[in-house]
Amino acid sequence: MKKIIFALMFTAGVVNISFAQNQVDALRFSQITYGGTARSMAMGGAFGALGADFSVLSINPGGIGFYKASEITFTPSIYTAKTSSEYAGLNGSDVKYNFNVSNAGIVFTITPKKAESSWKGVQFGFGVNRMANFNSAILIEGPNSTNSILDGYVNDAMGVVPKDLDPFSTEMAFNTYLIDTLGSLTNYISAIPDGGAMQSKFIETKGSVNEMVLTIGGNYNDRLYMGASFGFPYLSYYESSTYREIDEGDSIPGFKEMSLHEDLETDGTGFNFKFGLIYRIADWVRIGASVHTPTFYNLKDKYSKEMTATYDNGAHYTTESPKGSFNYELTTPLRATGSVAFIIGQYALISADYEFVDYSDARLRSGTYKFFDENDAIGRIYTATSNIRAGFEVRLAPISLRGGYQLNFSPYKDNLNDGQRMAFSGGIGLRDKSYFVDLAYVYSKKSEDYYLYANVPSAVVNKFSNHNILLTLGFRF
């Protein structure tokens, strides 16, 4: 257990010392929240046994078989992310806003000319669903009387001559005199040897995972609905952070303040395949099942750093790292979903999905680096877990009222961290023969520990609360 805790702390700390592709990236790009249409989002995304909604192309492609007419949808969204942070007895908070498109797609329906045919329809769909939103702003601040981020630089530099220091970490600290040699060229000391600085960090992230889907499905005898989706997700992730230590009490001899600014950009594309079935046992009950293969990503990181230091004598130093880049591959876990839906005539419906995913199966790969330690950490830190989605709809023609709930259990082993996410949703829709308008609101929250660097005395507790408003415009033809 202690080894796992240290591994997690080091994972967070290493981000501040040297950019690396690690288990944090593997989890970030493996977790999805199934965006899409406002109707689907209002019902908690529980569409695995339902259909005739574009979101099912990314959840259970078998749902495309329920389409009786061709349809086009477009869903703009307003997303608000608020983060509250507690560190060393102090609280910080920030908010980030994002306007995006949660869904855009078209489905074509072909009805066989022979009325006696067992195949009642064949459908083709193409479009985009949003699968994850990375927008956030985090403000952390608190005193640390025990140690400093510079302790990690000193440990890493020990035994290394200055000309061989890491240009993305220890060399930067050496060039700004935050660490310096003492007695020999391989023995180093810190400008903050005993802690005592006010520490702060501002982290701003943005980006998303969007999935382009190409789906084909069919309706066999109005009983069995099947479909397959070829998914082409594309992701972008941007992180900009500034970490500071300031001697507010003038208690650290010679030192005034230091800062480390880091920029990271990740872009990439992937491929996956989904297959799903829905069986209508009776007019009032349906069951569904779907399997999603792993997504095979090709990713590229670009990164850079800047470090500054100011001293009591007025001296000020600034140094920059080289511009770094690295190409690698990520394989996300397989997913399997079982679903059930109850249809109460023309008046209401209730649906639920159970999804299984094992985050310890994620893997990082590269032709130039083997990721032995990182993939080992993925297996030790993450675990198999479940996601539950439930929703309902009440039809008061032409108006429909909807509500939903999501629970994504923690991906961490042994209660190592929280990471559990809950979402509550609701919405209203107006339906006509040729068009429909749906409005949804989703509130989600989770709490997760974050470590500023390795060996920091206490964790930052980040509490995330997100608000999402979606409007779908749809037309049938």
Image: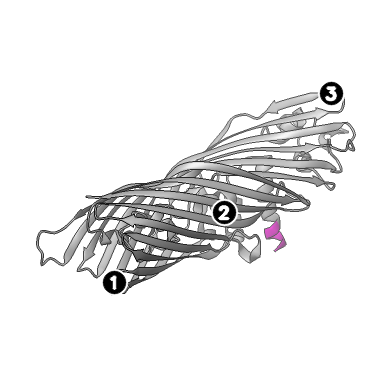
Front-most of 144 and 371?
144
Q: Height in image: 411 above or below 136?
A: below
Determine the secondary structure under disc 3: loop
Label 3–label 1 contact, CB within 8 A = no
Q: Amino acid at mark 1?
A: Arg
Give the quarter of the image for residue 247.
top right
Q: For residue 318: magenta?
A: no
Secondary structure mostly seen in magenta is helix
Looking at the rendering, in which quadrant would you find the N terminus? Answer: bottom right
Amino acid of disc 3? Gly
Q: Position of residue 410 (x, y in %)?
A: 58, 62
Nearer to the camera, 314 or 323 = 314
- Judging depth in this view, the residue of 359 and 387 nearest the camera is 387
- Mark 3 or mark 2: which is in front? 3
Q: How far separated are the C-alphas under marks 2 and 1?
A: 42 Å
Q: Earlier in the sequence, mark 3 or mark 2?
A: 3
CA neighbours of label 3 inside 10 A, class few (<14), some (14 to 19), many (20+): few
| Residue at left offset 70%, top offset 27% | 319
In magenta, the rendered stretch is: 1-5
Tell me the mark number nearer the camera, choosing from 2 and 1: 1
Residue of label 1:
280
Give SS at disc 2: helix
Residue type at the position of mark 2: Asn
Label 2 environment density (alpha carbons within 10 Å; few <14, some 14–19, many ≥20)? many
Question: Looking at the image, which residue is at 50% across and 53% down?
Answer: 30
Horizontally, residue 47 falls left or right of residue 241, namely: left
Image coordinates of residue 224 in percent, x first then y, are 26, 68
Alpha carbon distance from label 3 to label 2: 46 Å
To which quarter of the image does residue 228 belong?
bottom left
The residue under label 2 is 375
